[in-house]
């Protein structure tokens, strides 16, 4: 009897450890599948009629135009701080003079798209999740179904289009302002020659540096809009559910931005 | 008595949540041009019944039919097309916050029916007038309206397309008695004016008797009693009696398993 009990104990321990792990794995797989299905439906809705020009225009303004100040401010301070750091760090091995080139490459290939996307994740993904989540909680999405209108075409598609098309434009702005921030710090604080800074920046930059950043930005824009829409659309449980959806939208956007940034950078560096 | 095909019917509809059957073989139908009100206590399946009817929830078993055609296996696109014949007033009105009142009322006309904006606006203002909301209200946002005004705007949105069938989800919930009576009167007027078939759910017996030709009581996922609205007071079923007499009988023990 005691021996049988002793034999069962490790089995019980194993099942106590394995079961929750299995349950979590299945839940995670279900969630990934649900996001995949939602993403496919959303993409089809964005690319096929009916289109709602008023909604698309509204989202372009909300996501693109109103994000300009926050993206611009982030870029200028980051560019300036990057210039100071590279100058100080580069000084350890007499490489201060390549600071403009490193700032330009760092901003256009990496920091411009990533920072613009993170700002959009905080500002836009949260707002999308909150708005669509509140619509879900107050039966507005159900009402849309009964008014012969597909919520994916009316709500999700325009946000997805705006995310994909607006974030590259915001990134172009961030690239320009970020490089300008580096130039400001270099010429005002570090006594760099303005003409030399600009010449070095122009000489080092290649078209692909900017284009690869814009491709990243389009992918990040898709992620930010999709996460906002997905978490808002699937929100449950009233105000608390909407709050949870908002948090999840921002966190999942940020994680996916970093993960896809690494993947895209790997692909781009191998391709070039 | 002649047997005509019902306009709308639930046939043996079962809907379970986490193993519990909220609708347990619901059989209910309504004839063309009649107004049917479904009453019942909280958690008895009223909201689930209306959501299955609107295609917002898929039944686990059974059929839902409009004019004898099954709605259960329709694609999203087919269902949306069908909804052009349906008007719905939601419990909280469900007006779109980001649109003005007239844009809400004209939403289907503009976005699904392709009616030009100007013509849609004229029809929306006309519909608002029918529910006693003046043109000054048309340009306001839903958040600037009282609960009663929101319900009336929701009613205007439901009837503007002159639907064949109207659904009312708890139309008087959250309204004071005077506003509730006004909404009941408006619903009756609109249903009569359009000659539509109406299906309502409510726990408000005054509302039920005012807007319904017939009343059906939903209890534990099935129809417990059905009859003419005026006969509700004479129903002999103990569950129906207890529900109908609740106000007179006063509070009940909420832990009792017998409460409806």
Image (spheres, rainbow, N blue to C red):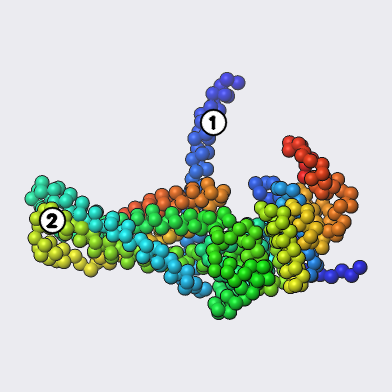
Residue ID at (60%, 63%) = A143
* Contact between labelled residues 1 and 2, with CB atoms less than 8 Å apart: no
Q: Position of residue B107 (x, y in %)?
A: 58, 70
Q: Residue furthest right?
A: B1
Mark 2 chain: A
- When asked about the image quadrant of residue A191, the answer is bottom left
Residue ID at (34%, 57%) = A117
Disc 1, SS: helix
| Residue labelled with disc 1 | A12
Q: Position of residue B39 (x, y in %)?
A: 76, 54
Q: In this orientation, does residue A203 appear?
A: yes
Please state, as top left, top right, bottom left or bottom right, where the C terminus of chain B lies in the image.
top right
How many numbered markers are drawn?
2
| Residue labelled with disc 2 | A188
* Label 1, residues with CA under 10 Å away: few <14, some 14-19, many ≥20: few
Q: CA distance from mark 2 to mark 1?
A: 69 Å
Q: Respond whether the residues carrying marks 2 and 1 are from the same subunit.
A: yes
Closer to the N terminus: mark 2 or mark 1? Answer: 1
B79 vs B11, left or right, is left
B147 vs A27, left or right, is right
A253 vs B242, left or right, is left
B215, B64: nearer the viewer: B215
């Amino acid at each position: 009897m005691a021996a049988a009990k002793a034999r069962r104990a490790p089995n019980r321990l194993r099942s106590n450890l394995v079961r929750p792990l299995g349950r979590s794995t299945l839940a995670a797989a279900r969630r990934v599948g649900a996001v995949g299905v939602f993403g496919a439906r959303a993409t089809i809705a964005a690319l096929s009629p009916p289109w709602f020009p008023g909604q698309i225009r509204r989202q372009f303004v909300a996501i693109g135009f109103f994000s300009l100040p926050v993206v611009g401010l982030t870029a200028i301070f980051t560019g300036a701080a990057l210039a100071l750091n590279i100058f100080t760090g580069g000084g350890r091995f007499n490489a201060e003079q390549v600071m403009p080139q490193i700032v330009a490459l760092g901003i256009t290939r990496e920091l411009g798209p990533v920072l613009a996307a993170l700002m959009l994740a905080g500002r836009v993904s949260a707002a999308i999740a909150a708005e669509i989540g509140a619509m879900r909680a107050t039966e507005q999405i159900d009402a849309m179904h009964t008014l012969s209108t597909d919520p994916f075409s009316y709500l999700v598609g325009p946000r997805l289009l705006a995310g994909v098309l607006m974030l590259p434009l915001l990134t172009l702005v961030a690239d320009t302002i970020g490089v300008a921030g580096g130039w400001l710090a270099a010429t005002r604080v570090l006594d760099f020659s303005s003409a030399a800074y600009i010449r070095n920046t122009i000489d080092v930059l290649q078209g692909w540096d900017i284009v690869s950043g814009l491709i990243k930005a389009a992918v990040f824009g898709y992620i930010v809009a999709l996460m906002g829409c997905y978490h808002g659309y699937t929100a449950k449980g009233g105000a608390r559910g909407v709050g949870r959806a908002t948090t999840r939208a921002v966190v999942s956007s940020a994680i996916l931005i970093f993960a896809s940034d690494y993947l895209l950078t790997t692909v781009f560096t191998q391709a070039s | 008595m002649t047997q005509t095909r019902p306009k709308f019917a639930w046939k043996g509809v079962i809907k379970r949540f986490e193993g519990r059957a909220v609708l347990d073989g619901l059989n209910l139908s309504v004839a063309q041009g009649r107004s049917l009100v479904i009453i019942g206590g909280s958690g008895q399946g009223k909201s689930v019944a209306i959501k299955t009817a609107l295609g917002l929830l898929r039944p686990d078993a059974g059929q839902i039919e409009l004019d004898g055609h099954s709605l259960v296996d329709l694609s999203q696109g087919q269902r949306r097309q069908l909804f052009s014949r349906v008007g719905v007033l939601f419990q909280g009105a469900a007006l779109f916050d980001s649109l003005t009142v007239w844009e809400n009322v004209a939403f289907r006309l503009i976005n699904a029916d392709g009616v030009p904006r100007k013509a849609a606006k004229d029809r929306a203002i006309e519909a608002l007038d029918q529910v006693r909301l003046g043109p000054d209200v048309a340009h306001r946002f839903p958040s600037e309206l009282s609960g009663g005004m929101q319900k009336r705007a929701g009613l205007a949105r439901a009837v503007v397309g002159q639907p064949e069938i109207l659904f009312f989800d708890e139309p008087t919930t959250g309204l004071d008695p005077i506003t509730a009576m006004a909404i009941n009167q408006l619903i009756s007027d609109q249903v009569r004016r359009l000659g539509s078939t109406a299906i309502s759910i409510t726990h408000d017996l005054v509302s039920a008797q005012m807007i319904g030709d017939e009343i059906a009581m939903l209890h534990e996922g099935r129809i417990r009693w059905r009859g003419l609205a005026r006969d509700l007071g004479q129903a002999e079923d103990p569950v129906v009696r207890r529900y109908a007499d609740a106000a007179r009988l006063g509070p009940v023990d909420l832990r009792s398993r017998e409460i409806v």
